[in-house]
Image (tube, rainbow, N blue to C red):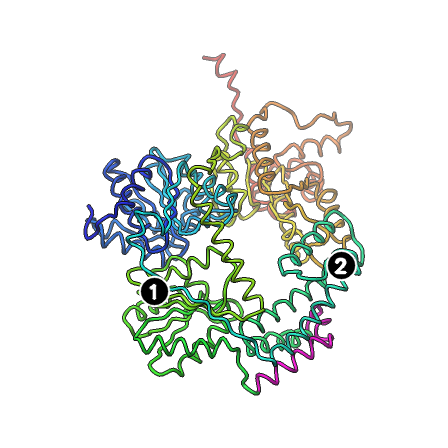
Amino acid sequence: MLKDFTPRLYQETILATASQKNTLVVLPTGMGKTGIALLLAIQRMKNYPNSKIVFLAPTKPLAEQHRQTFEKNLEIDSSELNVFTGFVKPEKRAELWQKSRIIFSTPQGLENDIISEKINLEDVSLVIFDEAHRATGDYSYNFIARQYLKKAKYPRILALTASPGSENEKIEEICRNLGIEDVEVRTKDDADVKPHVQKVEFLWEGVDLPDEFLKARKYLNDCFNSKLKEINKLGLISNLRNVSKKELLMLQASIHARLAKGEKDFDMMRCLSVAAEAIKVQHALELLETQGIDSLVSYLEGIFSQASVSKTKAVQNLAKDENFKSALVIAQKLAEEKVEHPKLSRLREIVSDEIGKNHKLLVFNNYRENASRIVDELKKIVNANPILFVGQAKKNGSGLSQKEQKEIIEKFRSGEYNIMVATSIGEEGLDIPKVDSVIFYEPIPSAIRQIQRRGRTGRSDKGKVVILYAKNTRDEAYKWSAHHKEKRMNSILKSLKTNLVLKNNQKECLKDFIENDFKITADYREKGNAVIKELMDSGVKIDLKHLETADYVISERIGVEYKTQKDFVDSIIDGRLLSQLRSIKENFEKPLIVVEGSGDLFSQRNVHANAIRGMIATIIVSYSVPLVFTRDNKETAALLVSIAKRESGVSKDFSLHLKKPLNIKEQQEYLVSSFPSVGPSLAKVLLDKFGNVKNIVNASEEELRKIEGVGEKIAKSIKEVAEKEYNNSLKEYLMG
């Protein structure tokens, strides 16, 4: 099946492992990870002729790129290679699944198809996870891997990455999440890889900030230090120097945790606000040091504009701060005088020199707005034809669709553009055509991102990487941070095969608790919810439907309205909750509300605690609906399973009416309340409306539904009990 492809020795040796075990392959960018996937796919299709292959990638352009590679190097009908994304309708994906041999998909779309049972993983003989370092936390790769290993008749997993991370714990987490049994690692210094590695020149270009920048920076630093001193006075931190944004975010998180436990006082609330101010000043400092005056002015002016309309204390306090205002005045003056960041002038010099050599360039910048300014500046260079390459549109700005991204890459490939200025979208996976030089406008503290950025060059020929940095700024700190992380990662990779402990991949779940095959109906809008994934991992069958009432239906009697803490409070504010309560009460004999979250319910929104308590009382007392609080999706799933288990074992012979009625009125209420889902309160309403039991029994479904509290299900149940022929199975048996 293979064509126009000659495997390298290290690809074949890695294949030998991957064919026997679920394998994580760590290989430098451009060294042919996709080639290994190609070889293993061929082997699996030969061993299992009627099986399918699934190739997962984080983005649609990357999935499409892999499809093109397979089409180029495989003797296979192109109609059997199909790309699945969220843009393809589920029904169409289900149809394509049946006639496809190899499916290239983004993980989110495939995850939804697994949940809704549009596809069957049973006959998939290989799943390939590209950019496998993403398989942490709740990323979709993890759920897909668990379901695949559980359902496939002959499972095999291949995970691919150039940079799994600089922490051993993270690499172990990736392996656990993807069911990895062995690891194959190659670095550019390994004997079998080295002959294929192109030489890449690596240059650090440092610049000095001008005095005008340093003046603005002093005011921002003074502003920042004043915020730290204020926090220190509140007794929550003691070190006034070298406090990073990360530490400030951790401080905020710790305060939120204390608030959630009920510790509420003015000092903590004030500390939260001051920390928010400090974080904003940190961001201003980062823009000044690493990006330039225009970016800084735009940000500072935005804060002052917000202060005039926003009630947020952090914004208002910054707008009043003398140091902050002074920094804005200086920055505005520098912008008027067209004083630019020295990195920009150095960038123009480097680009001009490279363009003179007829080279193609890829310039990385962290900020979309500044990347756009860089494009404008580079257009002034003779023979330079730059283009901006960014992600998809955001709420507050413009962006590029995936179709537009693909068109730009093709035009860059053809030479219509010779410079691509990209944000982080250009870092991962995309087959950006031959690049002679990669230029970082600023260092980044992430080893993974640094490796991926520079991996855009030196693929088929020698290349160059230039990293610009401002001396004595956070640029320099980021430079060393990435350096040490990469060094640590390389050390881990060298010892990975011998030292990595591949622990039991079986995830702790409810599976052992489940004795029967339960089936829970869920509203299809809940398909992305972690509760559904937890239920499926536990062996519960999920039936996705459009539910008018309730999010989960356990049985005909039990409907569950599920809410996170935030949604619970939001639904009180916008009035949804009362209508949902009425609806679930009308349609289910045993309605239930589950509120999930481990935070402080009373601090979710700016709502008085008594309003929330009042609604809780209304739910429990006025509507007689149980309200249950769970900490997380695991606990919610466990609760639903417990209810389902209990419901499946309910005896059909027990009586709901234990109290013996005393008079005619009570007997009438007793009799009517015994109808399905009616109960004492609704029985009184029905008797008041129809006058007696006979009229209720003789009423039509339409007449019954006119009564408040009687929905379609209750009306139908009353008519069924009243009109259906009595079936005495014992009598039939005796009469033979």
SS for dot 1: strand
Quadrant containing the C terminus is top left
| Cβ–Cβ under 8 Å for marks 1 and 2 | no
Please give the label number shown on residue 352.
none
Place of residue 522 in the rendered image (x, y in percent of width and height, measured from the top left): 51, 43
Residue placed at 59% from the left, 37% from the top?
558
Measure the alpha-carbon separation of dots 1 and 2: 53 Å
Relative placement, left or right, of 713 versus 279 is left
Of residue 360 and residue 547, the one placed in the foreground of this image is 360
Reading the image, the residue beneath label 1 is 463
Residue placed at 80% from the left, 61% from the top?
233
Identify the amino acid type marked 2. Met
Relative placement, left or right, of 568 versus 713 is right
Of residue 595 and residue 583, the one placed in the foreground of this image is 595
Of residue 353 and residue 70, the one placed in the foreground of this image is 353
Place of residue 350 in the rendered image (x, y in percent of width and height, measured from the top left): 40, 75
Identify the amino acid type marked 1. Gly
Reading the image, the residue beneath label 2 is 269
- Give the residues in magenta: 309-336
Q: Is residue 311 visible?
A: yes
> Which numbered disc flags the more N-terminal residue, 1 or 2?
2
Residue 526 among those drawn in magenta: no
Front position among marks 1 and 2 = 1
Residue placed at 27% from the left, 54% from the top?
69
Q: Is residue 424 above or below residue 96?
A: below
Relative placement, left or right, of 318 versus 72 is right
Prevailing SS of the magenta stretch:
helix
Say which quarter of the image contains residue 234: bottom right
SS for dot 2: helix
